[in-house]
Image: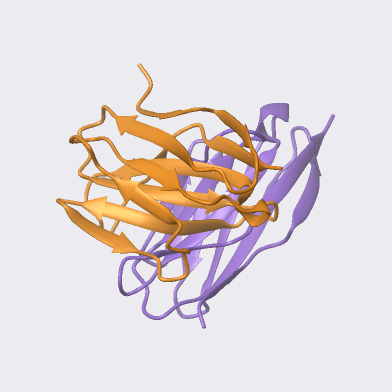
């Protein structure tokens, strides 16, 4: 079956760096997405990877290894506003998104 | 200007009732979706609609039905509501359906069935 695994919850300190991991199993693969969702709000797009390697976008970077079925989201210089859930989603061969349950990131001062 | 707007934001109703959630987008996107997010936070695709083609997730009960009364409008109708229907329902849109298909979500409609 198709599956996404990511940690349920992580805690980090303001100003630090945190890495949120995601492993996926899909029928075919057409890319890996990360979305951010603040409590009570809509998910918003952060990044898309389809080729192996690291994509950097400001304080956020996303990495993909297709051979390992693995991705991570790296958040640097953490700010309190980064407290949110981070959703990993893989696109299968039919261009359908398979979503993880999200990782709730708690930032402490 | 809200890109994807859905109403109502909150909906509290009794079991057995019928309810609808409206959604429209002003992004010029040609594909719209309905997602259900349950208490465990999984996002589950319910329907997608593109160029008059409706794709239905086969796991969705037929009490749920979408309509598109006009371009860029995609409403969700639910009949005979059940307790298990309580969730947040998100409307979303995208430009196309393949590849780097970035979704823009509405703010969500929280449905509570009593």
Q: Residue at x 78, y 51 (%)?
A: A10
- x%, y% of residue A107? 78, 37
Give the residue at the far front of this rendering: B16
Give the residue at the far top of this rendering: B1
Q: Please state which of residues B32 and A90 is positioned toward the viewer in this rendering.
A: B32
Give the residue at the far right of this rendering: A109
Is residue B9 in sight in this rendering?
yes
- x%, y% of residue A93? 32, 75
B47 relative position to B107: left or right: left
Quadrant of the drawing holding the C terminus of chain B? top right
- x%, y% of residue B40? 69, 56
- State the hue of chain B: orange
Q: Residue at x 34, y 68 (%)?
A: A30
Q: Please state which of residues A17 and A102 is positioned toward the viewer in this rendering.
A: A102
B93 relative position to A7: left or right: left
Is residue B98 in sight in this rendering?
no
User: How is this picture coloured?
Assistant: by chain
- Quadrant hosting residue B106: top left
B98 relative position to A30: left or right: left
Q: Residue at x 65, y 56 (%)?
A: B84
- State the hue of chain A: purple
Q: Please state which of residues A79 and A106 is positioned toward the viewer in this rendering.
A: A106
């Amino acid at each position: 079956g198709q599956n996404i695994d990511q940690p349920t919850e992580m805690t980090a300190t303001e100003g630090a760096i945190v890495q949120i991991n995601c492993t996926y199993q899909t029928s075919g693969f057409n890319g890996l997405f990360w979305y951010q969702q603040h409590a009570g709000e809509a998910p918003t797009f952060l990044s898309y990877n389809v080729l192996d390697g690291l994509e950097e976008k400001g304080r956020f970077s996303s990495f993909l290894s297709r051979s390992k079925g693995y991705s991570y989201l790296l958040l640097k210089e953490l700010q309190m506003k980064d407290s949110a859930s981070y959703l990993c989603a893989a696109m299968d061969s039919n261009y359908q998104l398979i979503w993880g349950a999200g990782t709730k990131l708690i930032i402490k001062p | 200007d809200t890109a994807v707007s859905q109403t109502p934001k909150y909906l509290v109703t009794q079991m057995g009732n019928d309810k609808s959630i409206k959604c429209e987008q002003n992004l010029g996107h040609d594909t719209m979706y309905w997602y259900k997010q349950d208490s465990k936070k999984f996002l589950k695709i319910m329907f997608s609609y593109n160029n008059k083609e409706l794709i239905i997730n086969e796991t969705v009960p037929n009490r749920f039905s979408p309509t598109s009364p006009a371009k860029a409008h995609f409403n969700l109708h639910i009949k005979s509501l059940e307790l298990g229907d309580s969730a947040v329902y998100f409307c979303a849109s995208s430009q196309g359906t393949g590849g780097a298909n970035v979704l823009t979500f509405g703010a969500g409609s929280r449905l509570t069935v009593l």
